[in-house]
Image (cartoon, rainbow, N blue to C red):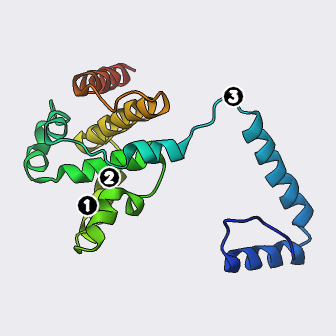
Amino acid sequence: MLDVGNGVGRYTRNALGRRLTENRLGPAFTRAVDQVAERLVASAHRTNYANRRRRMARWSMGATHWSRLFEELPGLTHMRTTANPRIASIIVWSDVTRAEAPHCPIVKKERGRGDARLLTSRTSALHEADIGRGERFRLRQRLSLYATQLAAACDQNRPLCVSVRAIVEEETRTRRTAQLR
């Protein structure tokens, strides 16, 4: 049977190997995997996601940052006052680490208390705001910018500090520029 690598579950490995063998695609698959591996080795910049997860393990967004991200978004006043900043923390953590929300330390901590499912469902709603327009979309853009700054801080081993004012200004400037087009 074709070896499709460690870290792949036994069922997946067997099913994939069987399909590749039946369709005589084993050599093509192996070449494709080798090409991806060669590109990764040759790439100048490789993100250390383990370092990001380690640095972000105890991070969470403070209530002040959460509140300030809503500046100039009057349609989200209710969300600003009622939504849990942990939701933003989970989204930003997921963006920085490129991992799914259920793996976030905040969610893992809540599993024993039964709050994890509620947190991830509320996170999903704001995650989906990444598509579209309007104020939820703008908030999601700000969270993405926040994550970009944190990711850079992780990669450069700097303190995990973010300027919310700079994020709001950049998102607002980008939006105005896009409206002019």
Please give the residue where the numbered disc 3 appears in the rendered image: 44
Q: Measured from the top left, where is residue 150 in percent x and y?
A: 38, 34
Q: Tell me which numbered mark, 3 or 1, is placed earlier along the sequence.
A: 3
Q: Nearer the viewer, residue 106 or 31?
A: 106
User: How many angstroms separate mark 1 from mark 2 (CA)?
Assistant: 10 Å
Please give the residue where the numbered disc 1 appears in the rendered image: 122
User: What amino acid type should be assigned to the residue bearing mark 1?
Assistant: Arg
- Residue 112, quarter of the rendered image: bottom left
User: How many angstroms separate mark 2 from mark 3 (CA)?
Assistant: 29 Å
Q: Residue at x 47, y 54 (%)?
A: 99
Dot 1 falls on a residue whose secondary structure is: helix
In the rendered structure, find residue 90 and report the number of the disc placed on it: 2
User: What amino acid type should be assigned to the residue bearing mark 2?
Assistant: Ile
Residue 131 in view here: no
Along the horizontal axis of the image, is 103 left or right of 146?
A: right
- Residue 123, quarter of the rendered image: bottom left
Q: Measured from the top left, where is residue 95 in percent x and y?
A: 42, 45
Dot 3 falls on a residue whose secondary structure is: loop
User: How many angstroms separate mark 3 from mark 1 (CA)?
Assistant: 37 Å
User: What amino acid type should be assigned to the residue bearing mark 3?
Assistant: Ala
Q: Nearer the viewer, mark 3 or mark 1?
A: 3
Looking at the rendered image, the quarter that the C terminus falls into is: top left
Confirm or deny contact between disc 2 and disc 3 (CB under 8 A): no
Q: Residue at x 26, y 61 (%)?
A: 122
Q: Measured from the top left, where is residue 47 in percent x and y?
A: 57, 38
Dot 2 falls on a residue whose secondary structure is: helix
